[in-house]
Image (tube, rainbow, N blue to C red):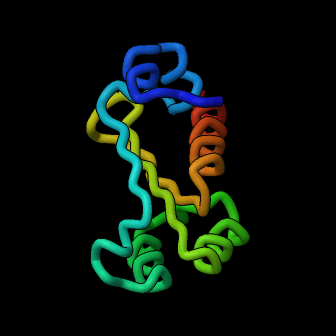
Amino acid sequence: MNITPEQLLTDTRLCETLFPRHKVCLSINHNNHRVYHESIERYIDDLESGSSSPWKDSNARERAIDTDELWEMTWFPDTSAGSYSICAPTLTELLTYAKEIELTDS
């Protein structure tokens, strides 16, 4: 499927299909470790210092390290007080995992 930036910004149904519900904010980062000139392993270790794992499973984490590809998403579904932060080795896996969380929490 080829999606233009204009379609993504203007098609509400497409946004609802791709992204989890978010009344406040949603952000996606790709390979942020490279901005900080850190190894992916060190960057991931820092990410994981929080209370819950951002990964769907350990296999996803290992594939991110093996490929040096890291996608991150943070979103606030209802208020600025509660958020989700997840990671995946590919954009497709990131979007799929986010929608799974959304369905579980609905």
Residue at the image point whose x is 27% and y is 37% from the top: 80
Q: Is residue 81 above or below residue 42?
A: above
Q: How many circles with numbers are drawn on the protein?
A: 0
Q: Quadrant of residue 37?
A: bottom left
| Viewer-closest of 89 and 44 | 89
In the drawing, does residue 18 fall left or right of residue 11?
right
Quadrant showing the C terminus: top right
Q: Is residue 38 above or below residue 81?
A: below
Q: Position of residue 23 (x, y in %)?
A: 35, 25
Residue at the image point whose x is 61% and y is 36% from the top: 99
Q: Position of residue 22 (x, y in %)?
A: 40, 29
Residue at the image point whose x is 43% and y is 59% from the top: 30
In the drawing, does residue 63 fall left or right of residue 39?
right
Q: Is residue 16 above or below residue 86?
A: above
Residue at the image point whose x is 62% and y is 75% from the top: 67
Q: Is residue 13 above or below residue 105?
A: above
Q: Position of residue 89 (x, y in %)?
A: 60, 63
Quadrant showing the N terminus: top right
| Viewer-closest of 77 and 38 | 38
Q: Position of residue 70 (x, y in %)?
A: 51, 65
